Amino acid sequence: MRENASSIEQLSLEAPAKVNLTLRVLGSRNDGYHDLESVVVAVDLLDTLELEAAPDLTLTCEGAAVPDGDENLVMKAARRLAAKSGCRKGAHLCLKKRIPAGRGFGGGSSDAAAALIGLNTLWRTGLTRRDLAAVGATVGSDVPVFFGAPVSVVRGRGENVEPVDAAPAWCMVLAWPDFGLPTAEVYAAYDRLARPAAPPPAATQILGHLLLPARDVRALLVNDLEPAANVVRGARMDVRAILEKAGAVAVGMTGSGSAYFALADTEAEARRLVEKVRAAGAEAQIAAPIVEVPKQKEVSS
Ligand code: C5P
């Protein structure tokens, strides 16, 4: 197929999940959000978004129940792009979901970023990646990170994304319970909880240790939202305890939960953990950090 942007009628994009290796809350803001510092890694748990030129804007989803219509971040992103660019074209979007929702993997935000990138091509709106990330920031705090590098430091409420030229060597185990946690509720619980007296390590400290054995970084995997997520979770499944009982040596919570990750030094170790976590009743899957940003594929012209 020849490179000819005017002839692109169909596109397919991969939308990766993210894991917050670390997440520090630096303070609350007047606009109801919190200032963060977080090291975020994209992982190869992928949704797929297919886009096709069409007269109207429509969305179908496969693989999981996600809200349709304007409640879906993909539709919200598409409408914001149309408003920003003045484009009146439509598209049919088909979302194939694999990233579980409400677990802290940023799946909906990643899908929204993919929609912005794909529609920018399909509609030939000509916005830069930076423009698209700014539109994404109005859709959700987690959207801009998906315009960054596979490893990024995120600051502000999520809109300041600094790429990091490094890749972790670990294999990851992602583990999650059969319930999600509403982000706003976790932040509200965070505001009600007392702060620890001794501050834990800075979010960025992990960056100097991405190639160390998993065991050596366990104390750096701080997430300030974990005590609040535990309050919102109540007596429901404790995924950290399950991972640690299974023998995981370095465990962290991603985003505002409810999912956790464990770092493993070998794939064999990760596979053993996945089996034990599944036997204990949680969902688990092996994942690798992404080393290159997934590319968009032109399906046909
Ligand atoms: O931006 P998004 O809609 O994903 O945020 C959902 C909720 O999470 C916000 O309404 C806010 O309560 C909380 N939040 C926050 N600080 C952030 C990101 C999200 O307080 N940096």
Image: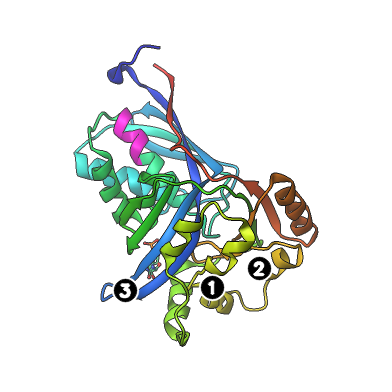
Q: Residue furthest left?
A: 86
**Disc 1 target residue:** 226
Label 1: state its secondary structure: helix
Q: Marks 3 and 1, how far apart in space?
A: 19 Å
Horizontally, residue 168 falls left or right of residue 147, namely right
Horizontally, residue 27 falls left or right of residue 211, namely left
Callout 2 touching callout 3 (CB < 8 Å): no
Horizontally, residue 119 falls left or right of residue 12, namely left
Q: Ligand 1 is found in which quarter of the picture?
A: bottom left
Label 3: state its secondary structure: loop
The residue positioned 55% from the left and 60% from the top of the image is 103
Closest to the camera, between mark 2 and mark 3, is 2
Q: Marks 2 and 3, how far apart in space?
A: 29 Å
Callout 2 touching callout 1 (CB < 8 Å): yes
The residue positioned 46% from the left and 72% from the top of the image is 201
Task: Please state which of residues 134 and 170 is positioned toward the viewer in this rendering.
Answer: 170
For residue 26, above or below residue 105: below
**Residues in magenta, as a range:** 116-122
In the rendered image, residue 212, in percent from the top left (x then y), is placed at 57, 55
Mark 3 within 8 Å of ligand 1, using the beta carbon: yes
Question: Which three-letter amino acid code belongs to the residue tagged 1?
Answer: Glu
Of callouts 2 and 3, the N-terminal one:
3
Of callouts 3 and 1, the N-terminal one:
3
The residue positioned 30% from the left and 34% from the top of the image is 120
In the rendered image, residue 116, in percent from the top left (x then y), is placed at 34, 40
Q: Residues within 10 Å of mark 3 (few under 14, many from 20)?
A: few
**Res. 240 mark:** 2
**Disc 3 target residue:** 32
Query: What is the basis of the colouring in this image?
Result: rainbow
